[in-house]
Structures are given as structure tokens and as C-alpha cells.
Image: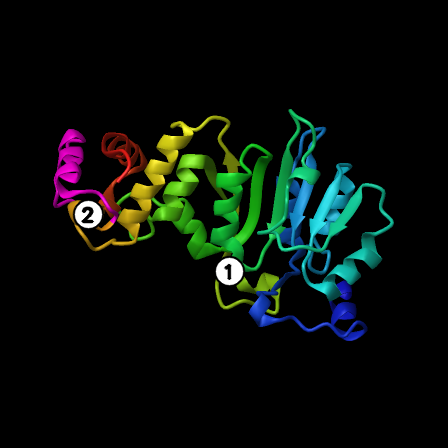
Amino acid sequence: MTNLHDLFTKEGFRPRKSAGQNFLVDKRILQQIDDSIQPPPGDVLLEVGGGTGALTERLVWKERPLTVVEPDHKLFDHLMKRFGSRELFHLVKADILKLDFGPYTPPPPAKITLVGNIPYYLTSPLITRLLEQERGRVRSISLMIQKEVALRLGAKPGTKAWGALSVCAGYYSDFEMLFPVGRKSFRPAPKVESAFIRLTPKEKLPLPEAETKNLFRLVRAIFQTRRKTLLNSLKSGGWLEDAARAGIKSSRLEPEVRGETLGLETLMELSLTLGKP
């Protein structure tokens, strides 16, 4: 709390709601995160959003190269003052969604162990980018996120939470809900409950690249038209009606079923049958 108090008073920093700045101050939760992050030798730690340095000060003791990405200029300066002299510490002022991961990726078989307490508006685009584009570079993705989104990541088919993000997480990774985190663990306190989660990218995907693209064309068509029948979702997604009916029949499904109820295995089978729209 002293560092947070100094940052707010001596350095004149004020958290910006528009930037989703809610800082984790609960030492018990910080210790749980610390215990959960165990990068193997050779891996590089990458922290998304160093903030006040509450987690950073624990990560620097793991004796791994640590890259911290922080876009806020005042927080960047604060982190540089605190940790800039550390031998294995590297601070990057950048938008994580635009960061080139290449320069921070160690030689194989080592990878990036990624961890962060991120602004919650970044959750879906960041997870999607990491799983779709950086999967081969990243060993694990451990993030503090909104609990509602965590439930979506681990949702089951047919439930209200099941959606495109659930399919993305299940296709590209293994998901773990590590522990819940209450609002009082942050300053300022957010309006939502949180959870710390881990996604472990799969070494090998179930489908080749072209078929993977077809799968997520299908997923977008279905979940952008959740209330429509499967047949109408496919037609809205660009498939001709005859081709859509034939694909549905080959997959042993009914045209009137809602696509949002289909599980990952069924979606993959259907996408292979349908091909491109």
C-alpha cells in the first residue's frame, strides 16, 4: 500500500477509469499469483501492465528475464524508478495489442510465460490475439479478468455463457479457473467480481490452418445470429441454402437446431462438411 500511496500523493498519479486502472493491493492474492507462476528454465516472463509494480516486485525474484509492458507514461516512469536497475528487467512502453512479440521470444524450446492484471476491456481482444497469432511463442497465459468473462471462457455448450470466446478458448487451449478475486482486493475497487485464470495453448491444433479458418467462419456466423436456427445462421453467413441443408444433414443435425447449442466437436465436424461459404 505504501507504493500505491506514494504514487497517488508524491507523484500525483490518479487512476483513469477510461483506462480500466484498478490496482491489485491484496497481498494474499498477490502471493497466490506468485505461487501459480512457475516458468521453466529458459523461459521469459512477460507481464502485461506493470501498474504500480505490486506483482512486478515478486516476478523479479524468479530469476528469469522479465519484460514488463506498460503504456501509461506515469506508471512507466514509476516502474523504471523502482526496477530499472535490475539486471534481468526490461520495460517496454507499448500497447500490448500492437506489440511485436518476436524480439521478446527466447530461442526454442523456451517460450514466453505471460502474466498480467489487465484492464478488463482488453480481455477478449488480447486472449484472441494470443491464442490465434502468438500461440507458438507463448507457454501459458495467466490473467486477472472479469469473473463473468472467466465463466464464458470455461462455459459448456447450450448454456447462456457459451459463445465464440468459449469456442476459441477450447479450440486453442486448455482453460483453468485458478481462483476468484473480490472487489475489495483492488484500489480503486471495480464494480465487478474478478478471477485469476490460466490458458495453456495446445501444442497441436485439431485442424489444419485452412480448416481452422473455416471453423471460425462458421462460429462467427452462428454466434452473431444466436437466436436464429442453424440453417438461417448459415444462410446469413454466406452459405447457399442447398449447401447448408446438405452439410447439416451430413452432420446428422436438424435444420431447426440453434447453432449456439452445438459443442466444439460438432462445430468442427460441421465446418469440415460445409467448407467455405
- The residue lying at 71 percent from left, 49 percent from top is 68
Q: Which residue is mark 1?
A: 121
Q: Position of residue 250 (x, y in %)?
A: 16, 29
For residue 63, which numbered disc appears in the image?
none
Q: Quadrant of residue 142?
A: top right
Q: Is residue 91 above or below residue 37?
A: below
Q: Nearer the viewer, residue 266 or 234?
A: 234
Q: Position of residue 130 (x, y in %)?
A: 53, 43
Q: Nearer the viewer, residue 270 or 237?
A: 237
Q: Position of residue 123 (x, y in %)?
A: 50, 53
How was this image coloured? rainbow
Q: Is residue 27 left or right of residue 235?
A: right
Answer whether residue 190 is visible to the viewer in this image. Answer: yes
- The residue lying at 56 percent from left, 48 percent from top is 143
Q: How many marks?
A: 2
Mark positioned earlier in the residue sequence (1 or 2): 1
| Residue kind at label 2, given as amino acid type | Lys
Q: Which residue is mark 2?
A: 235
Answer whether residue 178 is visible to the viewer in this image. Answer: no
The stretch in magenta equals: 237-258
* SS label for mark 1: helix
Q: Is residue 193 left or right of residue 7?
A: left
Q: Is residue 131 above or below residue 250?
A: below
| Residue kind at label 1, given as amino acid type | Tyr
Query: Can residue 36 be found in the magenta stretch?
Result: no
